[in-house]
Image (tube, helix red, strand yellow):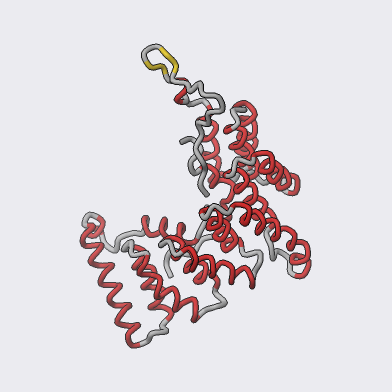
Amino acid sequence: MLLVGAIAFISFALAPLLSSVLDARQVSQPSSPQEANNPEAQQEELQAQARGYELVLQREPENETALRGLVEVRLQLNDIAGVLDPLEKLSALKPDEMRYTILLAQVKQFTDDLEGAAQIYRKILQQEPGNTQALQGLVELLVKQERPEAAIGLLEETLQLAPEANTAKAGSIDVVAVQLLLGQVYTEQQRFDEALQAYDNTQKANPADFRPLVGKGLILQRQGKIEEARAIFSTASSLAPPQYKDRIDALIAQLDAPTPADVQIDGQSGADTTEGADTTEGADTTNPELEPNP
């Protein structure tokens, strides 16, 4: 389980909007000390706010403030499916504000409407081929549908478009973000040589970026090259911003943690002697934030 979630380190700039909102709602402050100690009162207050927004929308169906408020409150109530209708209206009202459309796609993905989410992601990418949130969302969908080659093809095509797109408009396609995503897909498919090449390409172009180093370290760890992984993680920690150093240092500490193979049971090692046995788990992934308070 050491690697579960660890690959999220390599795509800090790509955390999904929905994840950001879901995290933000969990730390939202209650309106009074009494509510802080009374979850039922908090729920009642949120439900009252939702009813208030709904009443406003009955009179003014296109009231953006009420739509945004209803989305936020329903998220805090864990009513993920309930945000679909107001988000669809917001997306239609504000087509130029891509955060609404991205969040709508992610909610559809979260509620297992994969085809609906894919259609939205593809529509966004037709307009903005370098939209990293839509790109990551569609890549995640393709991998979930066991279509890794389609995901890899999408990322490679985006990299091919990058020189011309960035010449026409600087920063249209974040090449680093796309390469990191490509390395991540290769890693999840256990195509480690190709993943390392993707990370090497990123590192050569951006020597001060710690994320490809973390990606390489995770691969080396999975391959059992512990000392090489330790050196890579140490370099990544030295380059990382302060808010990420502790998390990378935790990866280094995990290198010294006992594995199931080291545990002694009745005086015997618990190691699996089956040839080619793989004791590692797959990694999961993460992208810019939508401010928690609409």
Above or below residue 171? Residue 23 is above
Position of 230 with respect to 110 (left or right) is right
> Which of these two is toward me, 27 or 113?
113
> Where residue 112 sits in the image (x, y, percent)?
43, 61
Q: Position of residue 271 (x, y in %)?
A: 47, 21
The residue furthest top is: 267
Left or right: residue 86 compared with residue 11: left
Residue 108 shown left or right of residue 187 in the figure: left
Residue positioned 56% across, 51% down in the render: 12
Farthest bottom residue in view: 59
The image shows residue 59, relative to residue 127, as above or below, that is below
Q: In which quarter of the image is residue 223?
A: top right
Residue at horizontal 68 percent and vertical 40 percent from the top: 196
Q: Name the quadrant containing residue 137.
A: bottom right
Q: Residue at x 69, y 62 (%)?
A: 173
- Percent coordinates x, y for residue 44 in the rendering: 23, 66
| Residue 19 pos. (x, y %) | 45, 57
Which residue is at 48% across, 66% downward?
A: 103
Classify 111 as above or below 2: below
The quadrant of the rendering that contains the C terminus is bottom left
Q: Is residue 225 above or below residue 17?
A: above
Q: Nearer the viewer, residue 11 or 29?
A: 11
